[in-house]
Amino acid sequence: MALNVIENVRVRPATKSSDDSVDSFSLPLNFFELRWIKFHPNQRVIFYRHTESSSETFHSHILPKLKLSLSHVLRYYLPLAGLLTWDPKDPKPSIIVSKNDTVSLTVAETDADFSFLTSNGLRPATLFHPLVPELEISDDSATLLSVQITLFPNQGFCIGIASHHSVNDGTTSAMFIKSWSHICRLQENSNAMEFPLLPEDLTPTFDRTVINIPSGLESKMIDFLSSRSKDSDNLKTLKPPPLDEISSDVVRVTLELTSENIEKLRERVRNELARSPLELHLSAFVIAYAYSWTCVVKARGGNPNRPVRFIYTADFRARLDPPFPATYFGSCVLPSGWFQYEAGTFLKEGGFVKAVEILSDSVKRLGSQGIESFFEDYVQRGKNIIPDAQAGSVAGSTRLAINRTDFGWGRPVKTEFVSIDRNEAFSMLERRDDSGGVEIGVCLKKGEMNTFLSLFKDGLSD
């Protein structure tokens, strides 16, 4: 696969009028955002099929619209063009927004097979990395957003996005992408002299006075992160720990659980678990994650006494008192779980039902547990982590409708979370055909993947 970079440009937030200007301001990170300051960037790539996208059409029609709408949407999402900075004299990092801020945009062309990359079958994970950009991260500063648009001549194009997790949880990232696509579609029929407007449900809220978190939790979060840092000489660095190279043996696959599959799995839980179904939280997320995780543990096999752990990310927007606004800009999520067990718990018959029970109890507990109690539990679990345990996690959500983001050339034919290939993580999205169910992305080494696929398929036919 050859990739040719056409240009690297900086996109500046647009001005709404001739007398409009961006005033410099600082946005302090909240308790939730501090958790993610050293987390590796989220990377996703969204594919759009457009068989009439010759190089000439792309550069004269499609690309200018994407660039202009990106500039417009950044005016609403100014912090994404800013910098996350951590002055050694300050107790915590802040986002600094200045009038000359820009976002990096890379434009490229590739000879790769668009249909192969957007298929559901086995594909080398390394093929997707050239399609997503990097963030610029140093000890004391980090960019928050970077974009790459790649043309597959006469096949389509893709939009690769790298975002900093500190202010880009799933909800904020989805809002930004939907806002960008909304403005891009408006350009077809709007007056060029009018600044595009966003609907209320896509207009971000930056008000940090809505945050009602017990005093002292922020410093406790920073202390917790410092205790886990491997760089004891520079505890205030924003650099994430180094990552290993992705093995050429790691492959990516997309699977689907239809609404019928999920209901069948729910019924299995109801029949096999002694507890009343009314005590359980049997959402599509719980069912899909428990089923996928159990198959991954079984695919690894091995010693039933070996340690395993799995987590998920919980959104606290609606769980706080008062709740955060639905359009709150930033991150309002924390890892939940760190459930540590022996592999045999999931290898044996009934392992799937046990995983459902664990996840269900955890999700239900979120509704009644205060944030202070949750954090204390989280820290305690973190202290007891076994380093070499098989670990699972989830990116994405079935509620964010990313697969419906139409920039004016139709809905995406594929969305991939590139960054899940760092470990045994899953991605979850709503199915693209709007029929319900879940689309699941998985990355594993090829040998384990073949076993996993067999287990996944056979388990649905039982």
Image: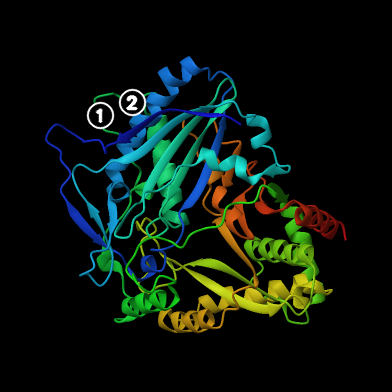
- Callout 2 touching callout 1 (CB < 8 Å): yes
Residue 349 image point, x, y percent: 84, 73
User: Label 1, on which residue?
Assistant: 194
Query: How far across and down, in percent of the image, does residue 25 sit?
Result: 18, 54
Amino acid type of disc 1?
Answer: Glu
What whole-number distance in Å separates the C-alpha atoms at marks 2 and 1?
A: 7 Å
- Above or below, 183 against 455 in this view is above
Number of numbered discs overlaid on the protein picture? 2
Q: Residue furthest left?
A: 19
Visible residue check, residue 360? yes
Q: Nearer the viewer, residue 233 or 6?
A: 233
Please give left or right for residue 189 compared with residue 2 in the image: left
Q: Is residue 279 left or right of residue 456?
A: left
Q: Residue at x 24, y 43 (%)?
A: 101
- Residue 245, percent from left and from top: 57, 53
SS class, disc 2: loop
Q: Which residue is mark 2?
A: 190
